[in-house]
Image (tube, rainbow, N blue to C red):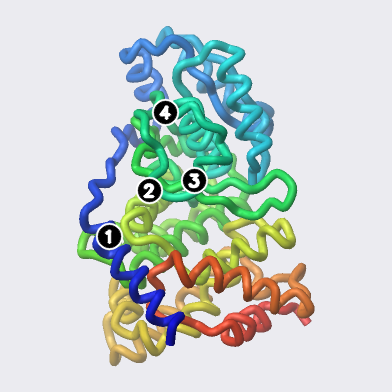
Amino acid sequence: MLKEFLHKRSVDVGKLAFKLMQVPIPVTFAGSGSSAELAEAIGDIEVKKLLIVTDEGLVQVGIVGKITDLLDAAGVPWALYTGVLPDPTYTEVNACIDTYRAQGCDSMLALGGGSPIDVAKVAAASVSNGKPAEELEGRFKLRKQMIPLFAIPTTAGTGSEVSAGAVVGEADSHKKKFLLDLKVVPLMIALDPDLMLGLPPAITAATGMDALTHAVESYLAKTASPESKRYAAISLRLIFKHLPVAVHDGKQIVARKGMLFAAYYAGLAFTRTSLGYVHAMAHAMGVKYGIPHGVANAAALPVVLDASRDDSIDQLAEMAEIIGIKTGTKESKADAFIAAVRALKADIGMEPTVPALLAADIPALAVEACAEVHMNYPVPTLLTQEEVEAGYRTLLSS
């Protein structure tokens, strides 16, 4: 009873907070060539020196070179930090800060997926507030205005380019640490599908399922509002329409653009509601096994939908209608939506199980997932540890 009471209090506080918050939306340039528009806009601001925060992979495939050429044409001085790794930790954040200071920069451009964007957010928050990055974990700890922060996502999944949060890991344990503050929303972004045409199918699929998880968990959240549901609904329509095409024919520019907008709107949605058990279960698996976040989300999503079905019939039925399932009872529509999620996963080649998952690890994983949820997320159903363990067991390969 105490757990339920505390969770209800947390949800009530969350509802009030989300209602009162005025979440900023970045100035957004979108479509083919929008990176050039962003570069020109940065030039108009006349920054002293821009630090590009990215990873070595994007250097190798030539995307970083394309952006630096655009910045040169716009007269923007720049420096480069390419040390971001998947599932980044404070090690990369602090190295980014060192580069920023050594190069005499006054602004940052995050270029890449969620990892470079989150590293740039935390690093920018640290240099802006004059505090070590590790001390900024938590909610609304930033007291000073951020340095100019820009973002160009090169995957369509995290929505970090519009979200008010960032996730990095501890250097040793890789345990996820969260920073939540409206000040970390970038000032300007570009959604340029030209940069995604070479994205491999597996990454396209995994990041797309991350966006889907954001949209679904936001729609189901007890803190959902008409505004957040509107954003989530747009994302759902776009994902079911464009993700299979983007995976199977990655050169389709319309599908790539559709998925960029899907991730964008899902980011707008969950920033106004928070998330749920899918992300908590995925985070625990990611830390333990190094599983890509989108892959872990894809595995956990239908499992959590099954577990919370009875308390989410109305919302599941509404999401079914959003993706075109118009006939049947509410119960049948709810079941059809869950089936559609599984069918989408299969279509884009996502595994139904997690090969790395070990039965012996499940109790500890469930403890971590429940701890993340019970005081943080406005979930429709408060699951017991035993129920979360049962969910994990359905993901065992043998």
Along the polypeptide, which appears first: circle 4 or circle 2?
A: 4
Q: Residue at x 49, y 84 (%)?
A: 307
**Residue 394, placed above or below residue 192:** below
Type of the residue with mark 2: Tyr
Q: Nearer the viewer, residue 318 or 376?
A: 376
Which label lies toward us, 1 or 2? 1
x and y, in percent, of residue 190 in the image: 39, 33
- Tags 4 and 3 in contact by the CB under 8 Å rule? no
Q: Amino acid at mark 4?
A: Leu
Q: Which residue is mark 4?
A: 149
Q: Which residue is mark 1?
A: 228
Q: For this view, does 25 lie left or right of residue 295?
A: left
Q: Quadrant of residue 42?
A: top left
Q: What separation in Å lies between label 3 and label 1 (alpha carbons)?
A: 19 Å
> Is there any visible trace of residue 178 in the rendered image?
yes
Which residue is depicted at the point 40% across and 20% down?
39
Distance, label 2 to label 3, CA atoms, is 15 Å
- Quadrant location of the N terminus? bottom left
Numbered mark located on residue 166 in the image: 3
The residue indicated by pointer 2 is 264
- In 3D space, how far apart are the residues under numbered discs 4 and 2 (Cα atoms)? 17 Å
User: Which residue is at 67% across, 78% downward?
Assistant: 395
> Hey, what amino acid is under mark 1?
Ser
Mark 4–mark 1 Cα distance, whole angstroms, equals 24 Å
Residue 235 spot, x, y in % from top left? 35, 58
The earlier-in-sequence mark between 2 and 3 is 3
User: Callout 1: few (<14), some (14-19), or many (20+) C-alpha neighbours within 10 Å?
Assistant: many
